[in-house]
């Protein structure tokens, strides 16, 4: 659970973050109230960084990554906040030794395994449905269901847009370089399910597509960089969704950019659990407000009939 906020006007920018982090353990989830989520990006210039979502990136704590970057940045400065943000992303993206090939393979395998498990679950649900209706199912039906479900998921992934930072060759490069890892995940997930040669090729493409398209998992990291560049008159911020690295290419996207200018004098921007900020600003929790408005709408729809009666 995380609540973060940025407040900007023409004079300054204020960043705030809670310190709670939820850890999953054998006996369930436990909340620790002492996590750092807000840091100075530079020791010498007014630029800050907040993180939310996953506490680490590629099994490296964000606090460690930020400290290493800050030391590397040193006294270097940029004219705009946007250049600070882009430089930090480039630090993650350009074959950084913090994220070796072993970790990239581990990330690829885990993500592929999870998505293949989702497909297998859908196949089993379809098979179960036919069994309940007809009392039996043939091998040919199982193979056809498996083939159709794999093709359906590939077709859905194809509809997603390619991330602008990812080269067009990335999908084929992943298939050629990590084919054995993808096959291992497929064997462990689908086990003895009948899979045709065409479906095998589709599964490889599904895996590679996961790291190239605008499709992000739930447990990603959010990164907010905010402050002043050397030539900035007013403050600004830029936030990213960051997921992982495969074949030395960072999977990320820009979530939000905001700035103060002559037309926009001030702004308040919540991140992560936005409802916490909304509750404070509006005096009511958004879900509760929606429920009340729904009930009132239903009452008002019936009100004329009640009056007539």
Image: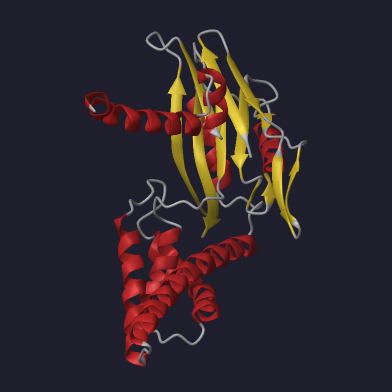
Of 230 and 112, nearer the camera is 112
Of 225 and 149, nearer the camera is 149
Above or below — where is 184 with respect to 306?
A: below
Please identify the residue farthest to the front as the structure is shown: 309
Q: How is the image coloured?
A: secondary structure
Q: Position of residue 61 (x, y in %)?
A: 70, 46
- Quadrant, the N terminus: top right
Q: Is residue 144 left or right of residue 9?
A: left
Q: Is residue 82 visible?
A: yes
Residue depicted at 52% across the width and 24% down the height: 284
- Quadrant, the C terminus: top left
Q: Is residue 193 left or right of residue 143?
A: right
Q: Position of residue 263 (x, y in %)?
A: 37, 10
Residue depicted at 38% across the width and 33% down the height: 294
Residue depicted at 76% across the width and 58% down the height: 27
Q: Position of residue 15 (x, y in %)?
A: 61, 22
Residue depicted at 61% across the width and 18% down the height: 14
């Amino acid at each position: 659970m995380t609540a973060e906020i940025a407040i900007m006007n023409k004079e300054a920018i204020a960043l705030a973050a809670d310190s709670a982090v939820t850890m999953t353990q054998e006996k369930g989830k436990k909340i620790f109230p002492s996590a750092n989520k807000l840091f100075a990006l530079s020791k010498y210039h007014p630029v800050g960084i907040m993180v939310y979502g996953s506490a680490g990136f590629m099994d490296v704590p964000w606090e460690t990554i930020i400290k290493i970057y800050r030391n590397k940045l040193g006294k270097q400065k940029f004219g705009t906040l946007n250049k600070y943000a882009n430089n930090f992303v480039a630090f993650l993206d350009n074959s950084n030794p913090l994220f070796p090939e072993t970790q990239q393979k581990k990330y690829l395998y885990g993500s592929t395994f999870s998505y293949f498990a989702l497909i297998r679950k859908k196949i089993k649900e379809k098979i179960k449905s036919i069994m309940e209706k007809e009392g039996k199912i043939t091998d040919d039906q199982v193979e056809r269901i498996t083939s159709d479900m794999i093709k359906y998921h590939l077709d859905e992934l194809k509809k997603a847009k390619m991330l602008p930072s990812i080269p067009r060759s990335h999908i084929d490069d992943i298939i050629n370089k990590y084919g054995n890892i993808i096959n291992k995940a497929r064997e462990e997930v689908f086990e003895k399910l009948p899979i045709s040669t065409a479906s095998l090729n589709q599964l490889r493409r599904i895996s590679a597509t996961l790291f190239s398209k605008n499709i992000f998992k739930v447990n990603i990291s959010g990164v907010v960089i905010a402050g002043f560049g050397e030539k900035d008159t007013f403050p600004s911020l830029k936030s990213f969704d960051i997921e992982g690295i495969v074949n030395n290419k960072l999977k990320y996207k820009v979530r939000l950019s905001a700035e103060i200018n002559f037309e926009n004098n001030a702004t308040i921007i919540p991140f992560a659990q936005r409802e916490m900020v909304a509750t404070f600003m509006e005096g009511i929790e958004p879900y509760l407000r929606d429920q009340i408005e729904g009930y009132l709408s239903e009452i008002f729809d019936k009100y004329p009939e009640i009056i007539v009666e």
